[in-house]
Image: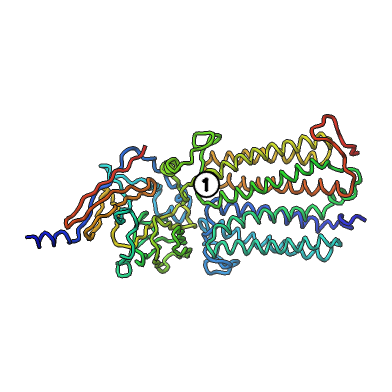
Amino acid sequence: MNADAPAKINRPLHWFAVLAAMATFLLLGAGGLVTSHEAGMSVPDWPNSYGYNMFAFPVSKWTGGIFYEHTHRLWASVVGLMTTILAVWIWRKDSRKWMRWLGVAAFLLVVVQGVLGGLRVVLIDTDLGIIHGVVGQTFFVLMCALALFTGGFWAKICEQKKFNVPRYLRMLVLSTTILIFVQLILGATMRGQHAGLSISDFPLAHGKIWPDTSAAAVARYNAERIQIMNVNPITAFQIILQMVHRIVALTIFIFVAICAAQAWRSLGKRDPLTRFAIFWLALILMQIGLGIATILSDKAADIATAHVLGGALSLVTGALGCIISFRRTARLPEVQTAPFAFGTLAANK
Amino acid sequence: MAGLVATQITRAADITGVITLKGTPPKEVEITPIMDNPDCAAMYNGKTPTTHFYVVGPKGGFADVVVSLKDASGNDLTGKSTGASAKPAVLDQKGCLYHPGISAIQTGQKLIVKNSDNCIHNVHTTSKAGNPEHNDAQMPGGADLTYTFNKPETLMKFQCDVHPWMFAWVSIFDNPYFCVSDQDGKFTIKNVPPGKYTIEANHRKLGAKTQTVEVAGKDVTVNFTFDVK
């Protein structure tokens, strides 16, 4: 028996894990809406809401920013409960020791995430808000991994004997996933500035390929900007941050395109990982489109939030791709396939 | 006669002036989210309020400019606050907007924040000068909130996160020599002791301009002109 595969597929457990992962994705959206609507501090107390027990806060008072922040807290409670159930279920029913501890890790992480969100509010700490955003996406990756590890697809991968993935390709997928995580941190830091758009045009930046970030130029940008929302003034740091975010986005696109091309060449067009990589590329293209739309729509809340969700999906796709490609190659001899070699396909049938 | 002149030179005087804006400022925009919020929209009878970043009178008078005194070298005047005994300043939340949008107080002076609306607001302050940050709930018809701040600060932000278009900016000085220009761009700093000073006019969007001024027993006039391109 393979120690990585479930001894027997527990379909109810697997589908509950999938449901919990989907609920987590919705929670990311709810959290994204909170920041996009600048509503993060609209409920000044925690864990109560305006003095009420969170679960008894009257619906009539869910107005303005309170609606987004309060429903985010309620949905977070649902996800916390589902994670707890999942962790207990895995502990009781899954024979894999590493899997049980992974369930415990998910439980602990959701508790940490809840506390981070609460402390962000009671300590009025913007930096904690950025960390809360990043940990939320990391938690989502963990929940998707739990769903993967409980399913039949994972069991099949664990039983395969011939499907290895060339080392260079595995490293490329891993590096790209790490770069997406860095991009996520950049994006969370940008949103945590609460300064609106530091660059409001695309593809140029303040009318240039590289924007002027002198004190006089930044003063002019602030003088000309008429914003409805209570955003902070733009700084040179924020402008540079957005430029780095744009450059990293382009880099990610190139890396993912190479991953897809190399997967096609090395593994064949019908290999699940090749299809995965093509899906990843499509996702990155969509994410770039959403990023552009965020700028051109003057950071419309729904578009900006969709961009956050696109980032989450891009990260989890890369992470699951890493897990699958490394697992397929574990304890198997390396196939010495040179990168960019034409017509080389691993025998995979 | 010499005694009379000496008395005049040592007498406190006022600094008055007019601030004007030259050029065409960016157009204000309608605060459309107000009308999407039923609690707030009810107070406007269908007429959407606009932003007020550049408030300019018919003759070019520039409002909402914070005018203050520094010492002759341009450093803050400190240790001269009379805030503890000053009349409290008032910041009101009315029509889901802060009134006034720009104000100035002394260190130690009470700032009373009112909620004159029929809806919940939260009063959230953000300080860059080390003043304590606050985030307090204020229910409709609820008690006024009172704050004091002990550190000078230029344009500290007050915001409501329930209604994220609501913000006000409060400058805090460690002396009583400041004011905010009115709708016609006029300002008066009262009872300034004799001496040489730097006078600063600071607009939230256009930044600060300074001039030197000397008070020698009689009222002084200083005017400022801001430009937009």
Which quarter shows the N terminus of chain A?
bottom right
Q: Looking at the picture, tell me which residue is in the foreground, A88 or A124.
A: A124
Which quarter shows the C terminus of chain A?
top right
For disc 1, the marked residue is A237
Identify the image quadrant of residue B91: bottom left
Image-based side of B80 in relation to A162, left or right = left
The answer to whether residue B225 is seen in the rendering is yes
Q: Position of residue A245 (x, y in %)?
A: 60, 43
What residue sits 79% from the left and 39% below the top? A275
Q: Secondary structure at mark 1?
A: helix
Label 1 crowd bin: few (<14), some (14–19), many (20+), radius 10 Å: few
Q: Looking at the picture, tell me which residue is in the foreground, A176 or A95.
A: A176
Identify the image quadrant of residue B170: bottom left
Under mark 1, the amino acid is Phe
**Is the residue A4 above or below the residue A88 in the image?**
above
Image-based side of B222 in relation to A103, left or right = left
Q: Looking at the picture, tell me which residue is in the foreground, A88 or A138.
A: A138
